[in-house]
Amino acid sequence: MSGSILVGLDIGGTSVKAMAVSPGDPTGPALAEVRHRTEPGREGIRDGITTAVRALVEAVGPATDVAGIGVGIPGFVSRGAVSHAVNLGLGAEPLDLLPTLRGLTSGPVGVENDVKTAALGARGWLARHDAGIDDYALLNVGTGLAAGMVLGGRLRAGATGMAGEIGHLVFDRSGPVCPCGQTGCLELYASGSGMRRSWSGTARQLFAAAEAGDASAVRTAADLTDGIAHAITLLAHAPDVALILVTGGMAARNPALRAAVSARLQHDDRTLVGRAVPVAPRVRWLPDDVAVGTRGAALLVAEEVRV
């Protein structure tokens, strides 16, 4: 299928990232990559998709055929429609992206939550570092907290599309009220937004202040560490995956946070349950520069493309 590309788009609150790969080798080198600023709102998102796809076609060559398009996007995704993506200006009314995508290709199209597509996109990195693993979870520690799971080599969406959405499991019933209406949700502790409830600086500054003995920083760092360790343990025990990949800027750029979480997991592994099924050896810290979002979006539809 010479002259064709498979497109993956990762739509975030600040930027739309897009990658073109070969339909015959979707885990191979990128043929082109583009990025532009996100324009929130329904029309802004549709226009951003069109702009990114056309820019990729221009970068690869004007005669290029788009063989398929996959999209990863925040929020609740069901049958190609997305809702409740606050950073994109989307509320409860679903935005159906399939008509926009079908106007750009005659091939297969797909839309999925961005963390789930990132889990799928981590497959190539994992194959280079832990070959043969087909049961794993990707935990994204960012502004919020969510996970994606690949079980038996296939992305798990769940019966309602909520597989891996662990951020709003209750962690502390005596904790603060979450914007979702519950009390003490895990996301209030194991995320950037949770950290900022009691700390105004960055995670790196938080751990530096904690090391220096600042009492407030010590408490917040402990909450963040315990929350992330708990999220990892949930993923290790509930679906019993072989590996948990941890990603997100907070973790990738903060060695002190990684060390604290690892120490907490190693401590827990000394318990009776921990000795039987240790968690710490199953954790991998995914580098921040691995393009799992765009790659995973392309892989959403790769198997449907005829080559």
Image: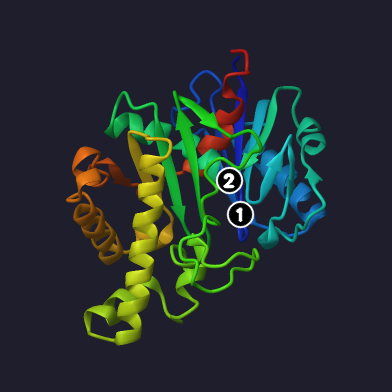
Q: Amino acid at mark 1?
A: Gly
Residue 202 spot, x, y in % from top left: 41, 75
Q: Image point 33% across, 64% down: which residue?
A: 225
Residue 227 spot, x, y in % from top left: 39, 61
Residue 222 spot, x, y in % from top left: 32, 71
Q: Amino acid at mark 2?
A: Asp
Question: Which quadrant of the view contains residue 138?
Answer: top left
Q: How many marks?
A: 2
Task: State yes or no: discs 2 and 1 in contact (Cβ < 8 Å).
Answer: yes
Q: Image point 55% across, 57% down: which residue?
A: 168
Say whether residue 214 is left or right of residue 185. left
- Residue 114: give its label: 2
- Residue 152: give its label: none
- Residue 12: give its label: 1
Q: Secondary structure at mark 2?
A: helix
Looking at the image, residue 293 lies above or below residue 172: above
* Quadrant holding the C terminus: top right
Q: Image point 22% across, 79% down: which residue?
A: 211
Residue 119 spot, x, y in % from top left: 47, 39
Looking at the image, residue 66 lies above or below residue 254: above
Q: Residues within 10 Å of mark 1 (few under 14, many from 20)?
A: many
Looking at the image, residue 208 lies above or below residue 170: below
* Quadrant holding the N terminus: top right
Q: CA distance from mark 2 to mark 1?
A: 8 Å
Q: Secondary structure at mark 1?
A: loop
